[in-house]
Amino acid sequence: MITTVFGTAAPGFESVRSAFESAFDGKPDMGAALSIRHRGRTVVDLWGGVADERTGEAWTGDTPSVIFSCTKGLSAILAARLVQEGRLDYQAAVTDYWPEFGAAGKEAVRVKDLLAHRSGLSAPREILTTADVVDWSTVTSYLAAQAPLWEPDSGWAYHAITHGWLIGEVVRRITGLTVGEYFEQSVAGPLDADAWIGLPAALSISVAHMQVGSTLAELVLNQAEARRPGRVDWSERAMTLGEAFPAALVGDAVGFNDPRVQEAEIPGAGGISSARALAKIWSATVHETEGVRLLDDPTLREATQVQSEGPPVLDVPGPWPRWGMGFQLDSEARRYLTPSGFGHDGAGGQVAFADPALGVGFAFLTNLMEGIDDFRGTAIIDALRAVLRPGSD
């Protein structure tokens, strides 16, 4: 069955539309959307497939979905805005803003260490439950008290979900607002963007149902079979937090399909957005978009300086990403359009980023989550690069 793709692509971007259409090949139950802005103007706005394979509900141009670690990019934007306003210093000790964090040998941890996955708090030492992680004070108090898994700033390892609470609590201490409130006030609201960190319970919208694709299911199974009995797999614990989330992050009304999780503020992975909103936000970080510019050039230069790269302290096979101040930078693990690109991808195939050299804001979202051999987003980025940088490949 061929999935019908709706929406528009500006003249010259036909190959990008073709790459998006190809993402549906062999995936009849998939839903997805692609939105691209170039110098503030929408040049691609496409969608297709099903938002909920259980009911057959169609994906529309405004369908919101869980964006997983793309949320970290939004949290990094919030931190950068506070730096831009002179309210946050990347080099400062975390305890300058969050005094309780200094327990258990973490007195010297800096804000930049939280953002660049260098704090040693990539996973909880104890098992956390869903009830724990939907309560902000429970999880932030736990992280403040926990001894790091390695000496902070001696190396990095991906803080898959804890990242958001760590920088989010700093944001809360500075602004007096929850991270979701500050995001609405400073980013989503001014841009009139349908994006949330913590979906308001009173908001009656239908969020796309996330499903586990075959390659992700195989990856989770292989990882489980490779684990040594009686030994904590800290990379796995970083994703599940013990018992809070399944290894694939979703199930039927479980994990990030659970309404309780969607309503909670989990700024490391729980953001919800439409592709249109996400592309608009990233566009506004590098180019005035609908009258809004979120970050100025000096702020961007500081926020995108490399802080972490190369092999992590945990045994994870390469290629490895590169990190700025919370932003995922261009690398062999995640290619953007040019070396200046920055943003964040997310579990299952989500990709969102900006490119200051080309003035691009980009978002590809899908509810069919695949594993590490998923090239749907990469193929679309490659097609867009060929349009905007002819002869660059």
Image (cartoon, rainbow, N blue to C red):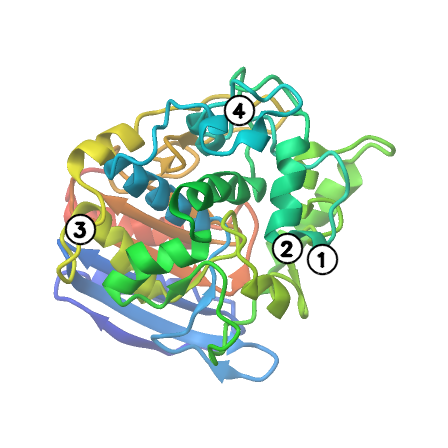
Write the residue at 40% across / 39% down. Answer: 334
Would you say the residues marked 1 and 2 are in contact, meaning their CB atoms lie under 8 Å apart? yes
On screen, residue 65 above or below 87? below
Disc on res. 293:
3
Determine whether the residue tagged by mark 2 lies in a helix, strand or loop.
Answer: loop
Q: Residue 207, image x and y in percent? A: 50, 73
Residue receiving disc 4 = 156
Tell me: 159 left or right of 65.
right
Q: Residue 34, image x and y in percent? A: 33, 63
The part of the image, by quadrant, that contains residue 17 is bottom left
Residue receiving disc 1 = 131
Camera-near label (1 vs 4) is 1
Label 2, residues with CA under 10 Å away: few <14, some 14-19, many ≥20: some
Disc on res. 135:
2
On screen, residue 10 above or below 123? below
Tell me: 299 left or right of 345.
left
Q: Relative to the observer, which residue lies in front, 133 or 337?
A: 133
Ranked by sequence position, the earlier of labels 3 and 4 is 4
Ranked by sequence position, the earlier of labels 3 and 1 is 1
Q: Given the image, on which type of amino acid does mark 2 rest?
A: Asp
Write the residue at 36% across / 67% down. Answer: 21
Ranked by sequence position, the earlier of labels 4 and 2 is 2
Label 1, residues with CA under 10 Å away: few <14, some 14-19, many ≥20: few
Q: What is the distance, in whole Å, between disc 4 and disc 2 at their CAs?
A: 27 Å
